[in-house]
Amino acid sequence: MKKIVCLLLTLCLIITVGCGGKKDDDTSSAISYSTYKGCIKIPDEVPTSFILAPTQNTTWSTKLTLNKDGTFTGEYRETLADQVENDTEYTLIYLCNFEGYFKDIKKVDEHTYTLTLGEYTMQYALGDEWVEGNVYYQSTEPFGIANSEEFGLYLPGKTTEGLKDNFLMWVNHKTLGGKLDTYVLHNTAVGYGFVEADQK
């Protein structure tokens, strides 16, 4: 009986550590692919590339690659050119390279899934600053991902009825007849909407 209990505890520990943990062979400091282990299954038809950006002001965007195992990598970048200080012109860039994973997925209906954010990490510490030539960089949070745990994953054909205005402002240009015309990742806490990148 004791052997069975020990075996069960060992299996539970393996499952807990394995889902969302870092890969053992990760030695890279730059984020070019996710170093997290995935533990869910994103539907095959869902694209991998998403983008959060205003439809008119293009000085900033958050780009996100969502892998089929629920891991993701991304970059937030805001570029402010023509800054001047002490008669010196420079470009200011707010930057965040990040990676993480979603730890849960549930199907609500044929056009709707819910995702729970497991964890994310940033390549640079928040507030780090550095200069490259005449470009001044400052590390910031992953805009659109930070400050939320619950996300919606919407497939084309989902009705916009009942969705809040602070979300629809990001996706109204991708609706047709009161329904979404593209794949969308919805940060439900703050209303941001990532649309399929090649359809921005």
Image (tube, rainbow, N blue to C red):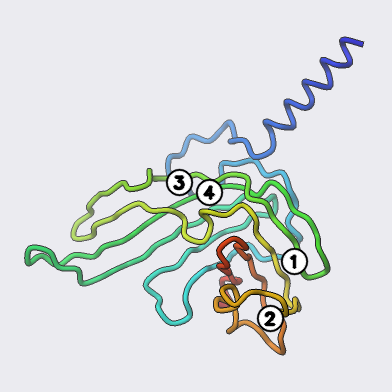
**Disc 2 designates what residue?**
181
* Label 4: how many Cα within 10 Å (few below 14, some 14–19, many 20+): many
Disc 3 residue type? Met
Of marks 1 and 3, which one's residue comes earlier in the chain?
1
Disc 4 residue type? Glu
| Label 1 – label 3 distance at C-alpha | 28 Å
Up/down of 147 relative to 18, above or below: below
| Label 3 – label 2 distance at C-alpha | 32 Å
Disc 1 residue type? Glu
Which quadrant would the N terminus be assigned to in this image?
top right
Residue 199, position in %: x, y? 58, 77
Of marks 2 and 4, which one's residue comes earlier in the chain?
4
Return the mark for residue 45. 1
Q: Secondary structure at mark 2?
A: loop
Q: Secondary structure at mark 3?
A: strand
| Label 2 – label 4 distance at C-alpha | 27 Å
* Label 3: how many Cα within 10 Å (few below 14, some 14–19, many 20+): many
Of marks 3 and 4, which one's residue comes earlier in the chain?
4
**Disc 4 designates what residue?**
99
Return the mark for residue 122. 3
Q: Secondary structure at mark 4?
A: strand
Residue 47, position in %: x, y? 66, 66
* Label 2: how many Cα within 10 Å (few below 14, some 14–19, many 20+): many
> Which residue: 19% across, 68% down?
83
Q: Which is in the foreground here, disc 1 or disc 3?
A: 3
Disc 2 residue type? Asp
Of marks 2 and 1, which one's residue comes earlier in the chain?
1
